[in-house]
Image (spheres, helix red, strand yellow):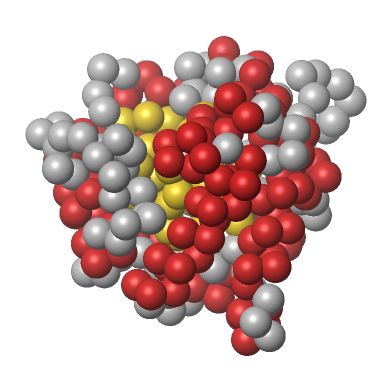
Amino acid sequence: MTAARTPLIAGNWKMHKTVEEAEAFIQALLPRVATFDSVDVGICPPFTSLQAMVDSARGSIVRVYAQNMHYADQGAFTGEVSAPMLSELDVHGVILGHSERREYFGETDKALALKVPKALEAGLEPILCVGETEEERERGDTERKLRHQIQEDLAKVPEDRLADVVIAYEPIWAIGTGLTATPEQAQEACAFVRALVGQRSEDAAQRVRVLYGGSMKADNAAELLALPDVDGGLVGGASLEAEPFSTIVGAASA
Ligand SMILES: O=C(CO)COP(=O)(O)O
């Protein structure tokens, strides 16, 4: 990893933790990560715990991200939350296009093309998720899928903002399965994602952070985080407990 890119370890809690459980987690996490340097730490709680986590993390290195948002500022969209609503809470960023949202909630590339620039405009750091299914990998379609998602989802992001997007490469077959991409697979895909950004802007390609996600754990993180084109991790299961999560943060720290 190039020194210019600060690694980011973000924990995607998905639909886990009540406010009380979230509080217990952050109180356990803060002392464990207080001494780490040169690493950005993110937690991505459900909407209900965002405010509490922003308040508890204030003044620490931990930043709070939402897991989704709508592309409109307001409107008749029952059940949705907008970018200005998240910024108002002092949320740092938002995960967009997670494969679970694409698969179970009909999240489309068309919607993401609106969401990513909207997040940036609202001062939020988007973590855009991309990745192939097992079937697509077996068919040799990994690069085609990544190209399609990156081109579509970032289409409306101006060149000078591209590097402000974090891109998480999450092979769907590795999410929650205990199957981790090999270092070669992770490096190859993350380098390819960076090269795709480079087709728009070489400068942005050098600066954009590309994360790996998919069964990243305390015992495999160091190897993945040492890869030249992997600038951090988007961690699911292993982010639900302070101990393994802080070990992963430590592996990314200088
Ligand atoms: O989906 C993920 C993070 O967004 C990865 O989840 P797991 O780490 O549980 O495989």
Quadrant position of residue 55: top left
What is the residue that sits farthest to the bottom in this orientation? 138
Quadrant position of residue 2: top left
The image position of residue 25, as x and y in percent, is 30, 42
Q: Decide if residue 46 is in sight here.
A: no
The image position of residue 31, as x and y in percent, is 14, 35
The image position of residue 29, as x and y in percent, is 23, 40
The residue positioned 65% from the left and 82% from the top of the image is 140
Q: Quadrant of the C terminus?
A: top left
Q: Decide if residue 228 is in sight here.
A: yes
The residue positioned 76% from the left and 48% from the top of the image is 152
Q: Is residue 202 left or right of residue 1?
A: right
Establish if 195 lies above or below 88: below
Establish if 165 lies above or below 90: below
Establish if 109 lies above or below 35: below
Q: Foreground: 208 or 177? A: 208
Q: Foreground: 47 or 173? A: 173
The image position of residue 96, as x and y in percent, is 62, 43
